[in-house]
Image: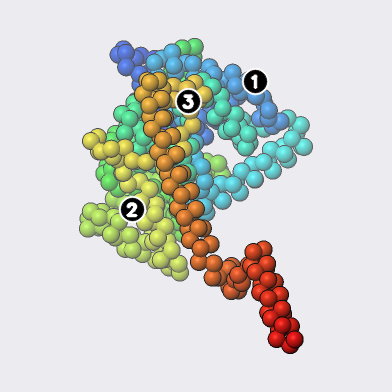
Amino acid sequence: MGVRGLQSYILAKCPDSLIPVELTANTDKKKRLIVVEGWSCLRSVYGPHMDFICGGQWQEFRASIRRFVNTFQQANCELVVFFSGGVEDDMRAEWARKKSQNRDTVNMVMQGLRQRGYAPDRKHFLPNETHPQVFRQVLLNCHVKVISTPFSTDKAMVEYAHKHSAYGILANDSDFIMMNAPRYLSLHHLRISGNTISTVIIDREKISDCLSLPLSLFPLLSCLLGNDVINYEILEDFHRRLLKDTEEEEGEKKKEEKEGIQLVTAVIDFVKNLEPEIKMNISSNVSDIVKQVLPESENREEVEVLFQSGLEQYKESQSKPDETEPVPSTVVTVSVVEKEKVKAKPKDKGAADEVSEEADAEEEEEREEVETGAVEEITEMISEAKIVDDGVEEKPVKTLDDDQKEEAKEEAEETEKKSTLR
């Protein structure tokens, strides 16, 4: 999503920060690792000649992806493509606003089809839910590593790029200007002609020089313009105060363009004019900043929490080179070929047989011990023969020999009585 209006402002006011680069001019033999933001790349790869109203141009889409990947591979570049998963709680309001805008775009497209009978401008293209799945699968078939993050990809991509010494990040998201990314390669300026790949590097240090604004204040500038965490609608009153001198006579489109440039300029001036104590430690002075930005806001505490979250997303969390790699918070999907490569090699057959026999012997001994213990316990219970399961005392069972003895005894007693009577 990015910072509202920032990239357009940079393109218009900081042309020196755009450094042309050709990715085919790779003189060394080492591959250049390029981290790609999958969603914005999808919009570029789904070519302008493909129909996006009916959708389903899967053969053409697959061919376009293969050409894209093959061109980078021939230029000795390795691609790692990131896709985002869910939406974090802090970003849900901005996400909902974007979804509402998409719904309005769909309604406008359908209205244009009904009224004019032809597809509207390409800028209204909205990928459907199937496009990312097809994109992932074709990338995997081309042996490209695909990483799906649980939430937003921005921070994960910067961490991955630093950890693996990537050449740069290819995306169309101005948040990477705010972050300490290795190189921000503009997907908007990407041109592929035959085997030639050209784009521009948007240099954040040159932007800092152009704006006369330290890099440490870039996160605050992002929050005051509106980003993925802070919805710009919360800042409308603040922006309106900054733009109170906007001329009303200009045409609507020209006015919007002028307001975009003027707004960014006004917010930059606001940040520059903050007290030095506040600029030295932004995180500790969020409350004072919010008081100046929204002096009459009733939910100031909630806005302060949003500002803290907005600043937090730009903090660096790089692992040191000598650190062991932590358990990743991302899900890595690789192709079937790569899965075959990482399969464990079998050990020596003889050693494996010995280990297997020892394990079987140990299991057999344990099984015998368990069985023996159970038999002894049952035998002990039977020998006592006092109490049974239901708590009823067990009566002794008479055998056949006992019955015969009792009958003989009774007959003897009767014979003795008869003889006495006689």
* Label 2 with label 1: CB-CB less than 8 Å: no
Who comes first in sequence, dot 1 or dot 3?
1
114, 347: nearer the viewer: 347
Q: Position of residue 332 (x, y in %)?
A: 46, 34
Q: Which secondary structure lies at badge 2?
A: helix
Q: Work out how far the residue at label 1 is from the one at label 3, CA to CA, in angstroms.
A: 26 Å
Q: Is residue 410 left or right of residue 203?
A: right
Q: Residue at x 51, y 63 (%)?
A: 383
Who comes first in sequence, dot 2 or dot 1?
1
Q: Label 2 is placed on what type of residue?
A: Phe
Total labels: the figure holds: 3
In this picture, is 131 found above or below 394? above
Q: Which residue is mark 3?
A: 339
Foreground disc of the pair 1, 3: 3
Q: Which residue is mark 1?
A: 59
Q: Which residue is mark 2?
A: 270
Foreground disc of the pair 2, 3: 3
Q: Work out how far the residue at label 2 is from the one at label 1, CA to CA, in angstroms.
A: 51 Å
In this picture, is 341 found above or below 89? above
Foreground disc of the pair 2, 1: 1
Q: Badge 3 local density, few (<14 within 10 Å), some, or many (20+)?
A: few
Q: Residue at x 27, y 46 (%)?
A: 216
